[in-house]
Image (spheres, helix red, strand yellow):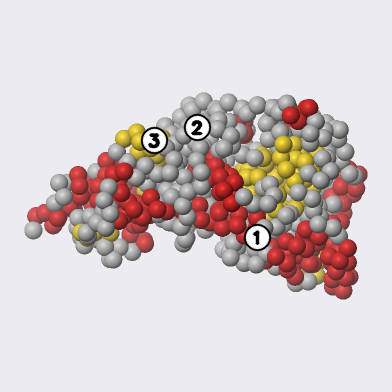
């Protein structure tokens, strides 16, 4: 165990003597230090408590923002420096907190930050994906909170959201988040470059298509860098037998920087047996012209036993594999390459990949066309133009069943809030929150029924109002896309930043290889868009049996007032 006084003294020395970081920029498939022109390699550590492999949050825990804990940063920086760390990855931050002290301390220690844009209750769920005004606000608020710090290197718009070939449609929503986050950064004219990327898992069925999809097409929607969570190398192995050679060959001609966003053997038995042999290989000449370094998983000891240190208050105990990683980092030394920022080889950058062919369920099922940019004004104008809206009696827990009722009786009433990622067609109002979407569906049903008063009742859960605007529901095509039908758009994949909204995520569009079903529930995926999972009832997709039940109930709700 390291004495408390030694830890504090070391931190004070670091903060008083270290220099601020130089700006980093991506050019071609490399990162560069703009002050020196030298190629920049990430020597990173995953730095957040309560986060599992792939960014999953431990059951029953809410996240703790590591960048808002100055005492923790002060405690940990000396050990991060022993590990040769120049970058930390954080999976979720509180965008309302003050990060100044910790970010400045990391800056003084020569450490950059890559932050995931989501948090456990606000992320793109792989089973019910959506890209809404609420999520847009969450993502842009994280950007705003960290953009002022020169050591903010970039952001992940998603982490292992698509993790197998059953949920590839979710990638369309994540790529829309990449597009709009990049556009927002550009619109704010921040004083240094910050990229937006995606971190993928190592699933053999999807990894190649994912790398192609997020790199293809309109580059305004393509990632600025590619993160790869990879755990293939365990113990004594080689560049070839570990699988690293194959993965390196696959990314040889990638057009943006690629790096290991998580790495380190995760075999059962914990981290004590990890020798980190792959670290030396990662920065060797066999790999450093393809990969821009990596982020070791992870700093804090958790239930999975892969931490480099154990922390108790201000005390830090080093794990066995901490020393092993330090030794490997020392062996790597200062990575030097002949590639320079203004060289001819960088100017002749690789070309983006072709988009993967859409083969449907069981294969790749995300079209190049993306969901529209969330626009708060579009959603508010739409609601203001309606005559039939949810009444005050509607509780949040009832929104899902009401969607089943309306959409089950009259699917055409829900066309404007339906998303089909496989076909690349999206309703104009898929970006709105669940209450706004329910209002749209109720009003469309009311219109389709000839504006009969009985059609705006639903056992008292709907009410008639006087519109305060006209044509909002008819003309709202979102901020991106062309009208393809009643309330439906096909997105072009390019846009500028849309409007913003406040509050928690409550939009409800879900997709599973095709047309969405609306549940009207809060998206509660894991940290950093991480696994895209949720443990709440909100994430449960409608089964055929439940939907039939909603239709039956809905018919009763509608027919009862008509028979009075």
Is there a contact, CB below 8 Å, between mark 3 and mark 1?
no
**What residue is pinned by disc 3?**
482
| Residue 244 position within the rendered picture, expressed as x and y whole percent measured from the top left | 76, 33
Instruction: Identify the image quadrant of the C terminus.
Output: bottom left
Residue at image position (46%, 52%) is 499
The disc label shown at residue 412, or none: none
- In the drawing, does residue 454 fall left or right of residue 527? left
Looking at the rendered image, the disc whose residue lies closer to the viewer, 2 or 1, is: 2
Which residue: 35% across, 36% down? 483
The N terminus is located in which quarter? bottom right
Q: In the figure, 292 relative to 316: above or below?
A: above
Residue, disc 1: 50
Question: How far across and how far down the image is residue 393, in percent?
Answer: 28, 66
Q: Quadrant of residue 33?
A: top right
Q: Earlier in the sequence, mark 3 or mark 2?
A: 2
The circle on residue 368 is: 2
Q: Is disc 2 surrounded by few (<14), some (14 to 19) or many (20+) residues within 10 Å?
A: many
Label 2, secondary structure: give it: loop
- Tell which circle, 2 or 1, labels the residue nearer the N-terminal end: 1
Left or right: where 381 falls relative to 300 = left
The x and y percentages for residue 438 are 32, 53
Please state the horizontal and vertical placement of residue 191, each as a whole percent of the image. Answer: 68, 52
Whether residue 543 sits left or right of residue 228 in the image: it is left
Circle nearer the N terminus (3, 1): 1
Q: How far apart are marks 2 and 1 (CA)?
A: 35 Å
Mark 3–mark 2 distance (CA, rounded to whole Å): 14 Å
Kindly report the distance in space between the C-alpha atoms of the residues bearing marks 3 and 1: 43 Å
**Whether label 3 touches label 2, CB < 8 Å:** no
């Amino acid at each position: 165990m390291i004495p408390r006084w030694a830890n504090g003294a070391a931190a004070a020395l670091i903060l008083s003597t270290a220099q601020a970081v130089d700006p980093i920029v991506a050019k071609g498939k490399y990162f560069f230090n703009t002050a020196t022109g030298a190629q920049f390699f990430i020597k990173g550590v995953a730095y957040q408590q309560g986060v599992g492999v792939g960014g999953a949050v431990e059951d029953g825990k809410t996240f703790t923002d590591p960048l808002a804990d100055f005492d923790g940063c002060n405690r940990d920086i000396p050990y991060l420096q022993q590990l040769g760390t120049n970058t930390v990855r954080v999976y979720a931050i509180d965008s309302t907190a003050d990060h100044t002290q910790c970010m400045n301390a990391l800056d003084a220690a020569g450490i950059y930050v890559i932050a995931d844009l989501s948090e456990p209750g606000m992320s793109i769920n792989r089973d019910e994906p959506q890209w809404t005004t609420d999520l847009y606000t969450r993502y842009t608020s994280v950007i705003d909170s960290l953009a002022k710090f020169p050591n903010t290197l970039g952001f992940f718009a998603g982490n292992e959201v698509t993790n197998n070939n059953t949920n590839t449609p979710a990638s369309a929503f994540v790529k829309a988040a990449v597009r709009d986050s990049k556009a927002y950064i550009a619109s704010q004219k921040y004083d240094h470059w910050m990229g937006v990327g995606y971190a993928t898992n190592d699933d053999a069925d999807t990894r190649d298509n994912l790398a192609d999809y997020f790199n293809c097409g309109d580059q305004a929607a393509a990632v600025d860098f590619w993160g790869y969570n990879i755990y293939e190398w365990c113990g004594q192995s080689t560049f070839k037998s570990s699988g690293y050679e194959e993965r390196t060959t696959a990314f040889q001609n990638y057009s943006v920087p690629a790096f290991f966003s998580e790495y380190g053997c995760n075999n059962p038995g914990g981290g004590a047996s990890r020798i980190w042999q792959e670290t030396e290989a990662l920065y060797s000449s066999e790999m450093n012209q393809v990969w821009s370094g990596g982020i070791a998983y992870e700093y804090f000891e958790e239930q999975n036993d892969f931490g480099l240190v154990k922390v108790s208050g201000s005390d830090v105990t080093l794990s066995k594999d901490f020393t092993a990683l330090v030794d490997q980092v020392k062996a790597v030394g200062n990575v030097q390459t002949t590639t320079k920022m203004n060289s001819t080889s960088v100017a002749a950058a690789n070309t983006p990949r072709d988009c993967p062919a859409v083969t449907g369920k069981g294969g790749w099922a995300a079209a190049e066309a993306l969901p529209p940019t969330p626009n708060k004004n579009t959603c508010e104008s739409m609601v203001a133009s309606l005559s039939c809206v949810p009444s005050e009696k509607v509780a949040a827990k009832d929104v899902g069943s009401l969607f089943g009722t309306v959409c089950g009786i009259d699917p055409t009433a829900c066309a404007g809030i339906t998303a089909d990622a496989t076909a690349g067609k999206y309703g104009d109002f898929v970006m709105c929150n669940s209450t706004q979407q329910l209002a749209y569906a109720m009003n469309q049903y009311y219109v389709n029924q000839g504006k009969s008063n009985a059609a705006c009742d639903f056992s008292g859960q709907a009410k008639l109002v006087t519109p305060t605007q006209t044509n909002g529901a008819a003309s709202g095509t979102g901020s991106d896309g062309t009208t393809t039908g009643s309330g439906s758009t096909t997105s072009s994949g390019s846009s500028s930043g849309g409007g913003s909204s406040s509050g928690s995520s409550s939009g409800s569009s879900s997709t599973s290889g095709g047309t969405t079903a609306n549940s009207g529930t809060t998206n509660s995926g894991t940290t950093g868009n991480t696994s895209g999972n949720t443990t709440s009832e909100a994430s449960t997709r409608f089964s055929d049996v439940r939907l039939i039940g909603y239709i039956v109930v809905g018919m009763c709700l509608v027919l009862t007032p008509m028979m009075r």
